[in-house]
């Protein structure tokens, strides 16, 4: 069931599980994702186009130019939804904040790798130790993370399987060769998916 988060004489903004939809007075529908990012000023060329159409007070949000008040309503709702999702996730995943802290440590180590290799290595070792302790403390979350990683690897193998049916860098493969490569990637994907499902 869609919920209206903004309405004026020119448009209505509805939100559902799949995202936001701006419905204009003339019936056009513009879709946006659920989490919209930041409100940004229009580029110079876009501002000129909008001004030529006699419109003022427009900003950019999630790939669309829109009046500032519309963007503000969507942004507020999106931020509140994101915070609700975070709270729900945190309550069902007690180790979530600790895991994010480990990811931040890893990111800091990666950033420092070129300028301060010694500190970077120290941070990587600390992150490894903290991750091992986290996996022991939160085994259910660790299993969930492992399953998500396996599913991501399986999706990559399925992409490779599709590509193997059409890609031949030097024209030396027969259609049977390409099908064999594709089947091998599909088999690897199925094995990863089976492991992700606990099989």
Image: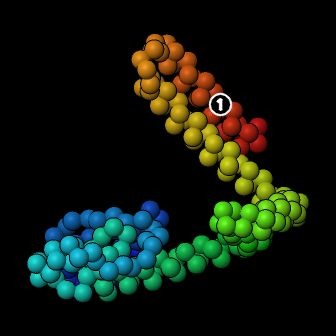
Residue 68's quadrant in the figure?
Answer: bottom left
- Tell which of 182 and 4 is nearer to you: 182
Residue 57: quarter of image: bottom left
Residue 100 visible to an observer of this rendering: no
Q: How dense is the environment of label 1, judged by Cα within 10 Å: few (below 14), some, or many (20 and up)? A: some
Residue at 29 percent of width and 65 percent of height? 30
Please give left or right for residue 142 compared with residue 42 in the image: right
Q: Indicate the position of residue 49 as horizontal and vertical percent values.
A: 15, 74
Please name the residue that numbered disc 1 is placed on: 188
Residue lying furthest front: 115
Location of residue 112 by image quarter = bottom right
Residue 32, placed above or below residue 83: above
Looking at the image, residue 168 lies above or below residue 15: above
x and y percent of residue 134 in the render?
A: 84, 64
Residue in the image at 77% along x and 68% along y: 119
Q: How many marks?
A: 1
| Left or right: 128 as drawn, with respect to 44 | right
Q: Quadrant of the N terminus?
A: bottom left
Q: Nearer the viewer, residue 192 or 39?
A: 39
In the depicted structure, whether residue 106 falls above or below residue 180: below
Q: Is residue 86 visible?
A: yes
Colour logic: rainbow
Q: Residue at x 50, y 79 (%)?
A: 79
Check disc 1 and report its element: helix, strand or loop. helix
At a point 72% along the width and 67% down the height, the residue shown is 116
């Amino acid at each position: 069931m869609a919920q209206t988060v903004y309405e004026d004489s020119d448009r209505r903004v509805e939100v559902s599980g799949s995202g936001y939809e701006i419905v204009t007075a003339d019936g056009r529908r513009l879709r946006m994702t659920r989490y919209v990012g930041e409100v940004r000023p229009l580029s110079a060329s876009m501002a000129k186009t909008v001004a030529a159409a006699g419109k003022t007070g427009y900003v950019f949000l999630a790939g669309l130019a829109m009046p500032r008040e519309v963007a503000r309503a969507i942004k507020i709702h999106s931020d509140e939804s994101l915070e609700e999702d975070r709270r729900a996730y945190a309550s069902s995943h007690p180790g979530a904040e600790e895991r994010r802290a480990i990811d931040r440590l890893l990111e800091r180590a990666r950033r420092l790798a070129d300028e301060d290799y010694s500190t970077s290595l120290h941070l990587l070792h600390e992150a490894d130790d903290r991750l091992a302790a986290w996996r022991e403390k939160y085994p259910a979350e660790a299993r969930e993370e492992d399953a998500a990683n396996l599913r991501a690897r399986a999706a990559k193998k399925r992409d490779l399987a599709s590509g193997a049916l059409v890609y031949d860098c030097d024209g030396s493969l027969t259609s049977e060769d390409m099908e064999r490569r594709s089947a091998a990637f599909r088999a690897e994907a199925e094995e990863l998916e089976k492991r992700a499902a606990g099989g």
